[in-house]
Amino acid sequence: MTIETAAWIVLDPVSSANLGVATGVAATIISCAIALPQTLRIWRLRSYRGVSVLMWALLSVGMSTWIGYGYLRGNYTLAIANTVTTGQALLLLLGVARASSLPSLRKFGIGAVLALACVTTITIGYLSPPVLVAALLATPPFIRLGQIGTSWRNARTRAASDVSIWTWSLMLVTSALWTLHGVFVADPLVAGLSLIAALGAVVVVGLEVTNRRRRGPHTA
């Protein structure tokens, strides 16, 4: 970005707002498909090797806070995107439960607790003091450390992995778009945390690609 371009963005708030809307809409559209490849893979294979289930569970709760925050700020693209992504994450976890050997009653109990947690954090994101909201909003990018750790172990041991590189590539693209969106709408919280999320996605994709190359072209 040149100095002239940066100055144009700062001095032309209308154009900056339009770019904010454009990047937000683009991120929202792509967000609608983020978890879909991973969800379909788990449901099709009935396997979730190498997938950090705890990360997806915590991520669904963390993203729920962004739903409330989006409505609070009047940023409906942010709220809608996180609503769709949270729903996909919950569907993914349902696929994990289907593939696991846990008793049905325990699966139902875990699902009920997770759903209640999501509703609670949506409310917190909308009603709570800014300091508490900021702390909760900061969790999703760092929650991704769970998958980074799992992918690191997989790559080091050349273990089989069902992690969808497509899902994490989409996460990278959407996080980059949300970073730009945060810059254009002057929301440093969105911009900063989205940048951290993008970097985390880069690491996961790199580790998973490395693991597949080490294991050979015909391995899962």
Image (tube, grey):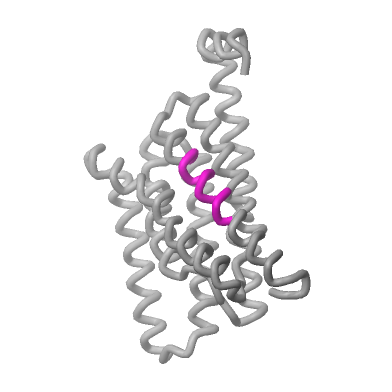
Above or below, 119 against 8 in this view is below
- The stretch in magenta equals 194-204
Residue 190 location, quadrant: top left
Q: Position of residue 186 (x, y in %)?
A: 44, 24
Q: Position of residue 188 (x, y in %)?
A: 41, 29
Q: Position of residue 166 (x, y in %)?
A: 67, 58
Name of the residue lying farthest toward the right: 217
Above or below, 152 against 76 in this view is below
| Residue drawn at x 60%, y 67% as measured from the top left | 163
Left or right position of 181 against 73? right
Above or below, 23 against 81 in this view is above
Please tell me whether residue 198 belongs to the stretch shown in magenta.
yes
Please tell me whether residue 56 belongs to the stretch shown in magenta.
no
Of residues 78 and 48, which is closer to you in this image?
A: 48
Q: Position of residue 78 (x, y in %)?
A: 49, 41
Left or right position of 208 against 217? left
| Residue drawn at x 36%, y 38% as measured from the top left | 72
| Residue drawn at x 48%, y 80% as measured from the top left | 97
Of residues 74 and 160, which is closer to you in this image?
A: 160
